[in-house]
Image (cartoon, grey):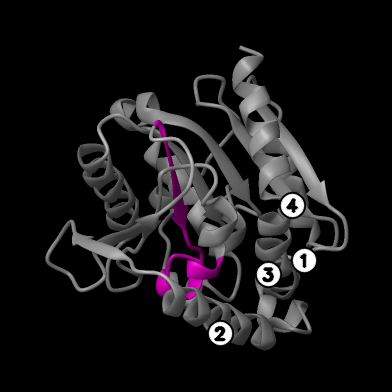
Amino acid sequence: MQAFWDRQLKFSEVIPGFTHALDRMAQDSDAVAQGRSFTRAAYGDHPRQWVEWTEGKGSNSVLPVIIHGGYWRALQAEAHRFMVPAFLSAGANVANVEYRLMPEVRLADVVEDAKTALHLLARAYPAARFVLIGHSAGAHLALSALTDDALATRTLGVLSLSGIYDLAPVRLSFLQEELALTVDEVAEFTLSPQTNRPPVLYVNGSTETPEYLRGGALMSQSENAGWHVIDGADHMSLTWAACDQADELMSKLYSLGNSK
């Protein structure tokens, strides 16, 4: 049973270029950091409880916010700065969220970090509405944060890049040894299609594993939601592919909002 779910979720074995993708993330993000300044603010006492932002070129009424993945237990916001340039034209600033990791904390704490970080940004940018850009577990956190009504009201839409929404397979996979998800956590934090969310564009790559494609297809079956599949992209290369298509994806997301 675990072997089946590992084939869906264990990217170090499923994606031939997985290690190269991680190296490229770091290198591309270092290049972005060398070319621009980031302002950082803490929203808690833990070293990972911070948000940062950099100057964009777009409207003061929009704040793109990047939330990284890593199955809630790995990776860093700094290594996802490479995504920032693609969204500079969307807002006057672009933000990047860091959060605590499992198993040091529980999933409820990680979700709470995402909410608290967004509340800090809401105070810092009182006139702006969020466009949340979450990848993998970051997509799960972006959507989970919207259970906070105040944050949902402040959110213009979500680009949900290869998100993981059904947590039952996670508990059956190699990840369970590290995450130790409980049955109650799976029930509480599994996401389903909902009509009361802000607009969400679910984005997948055509070469992703069936479980990820299933997740995007199912989650998009609600009001104000859409599904966009990028040909040839896998779970990791999707981040760069989405950046390459950022203007198109933003346009599709805005059109979902206008169809209300």
Instruction: Give the answer, above or below, for where 198 lies relative to 217.
Output: above
Q: Residue 204 has which mark?
A: 4
Q: CA distance from mark 1 to mark 4?
A: 8 Å
Q: Residue 236 has which mark?
A: 3
Which residue is found at the position 72% from the left and 37% from the top? 218
Residue that carries the numbered disc 2 in the rendered image: 27
Which residue is found at the position 79% from the left and 62% from the top? 208
Which residue is found at the position 66% from the left and 75% from the top? 10
Q: Amino acid at mark 2?
A: Gln
Using a 10 Å C-alpha cutoff, classify the residue at mark 3 as few (fewer than 14 neighbours), some (14 to 19) or many (20 or more): many
Q: Amino acid at mark 1?
A: Asp
Which residue is found at the position 43% from the left and 62% from the top? 181
Q: Is residue 100 left or right of residue 181?
A: left
64 falls in the magenta region: yes
Using a 10 Å C-alpha cutoff, classify the residue at mark 1 as few (fewer than 14 neighbours), some (14 to 19) or many (20 or more): many
Lower position in the chain sequence, tag 3 or tag 4? 4
Q: CA distance from mark 2 to mark 4?
A: 24 Å
Q: Do callouts 1 and 2 mark residues in contact (Cβ within 8 Å)?
A: no
Q: CA distance from mark 3 to mark 1?
A: 6 Å
Residue that carries the numbered disc 1 in the rendered image: 234
Residue 186 visible in this rendered orientation of the protein? no
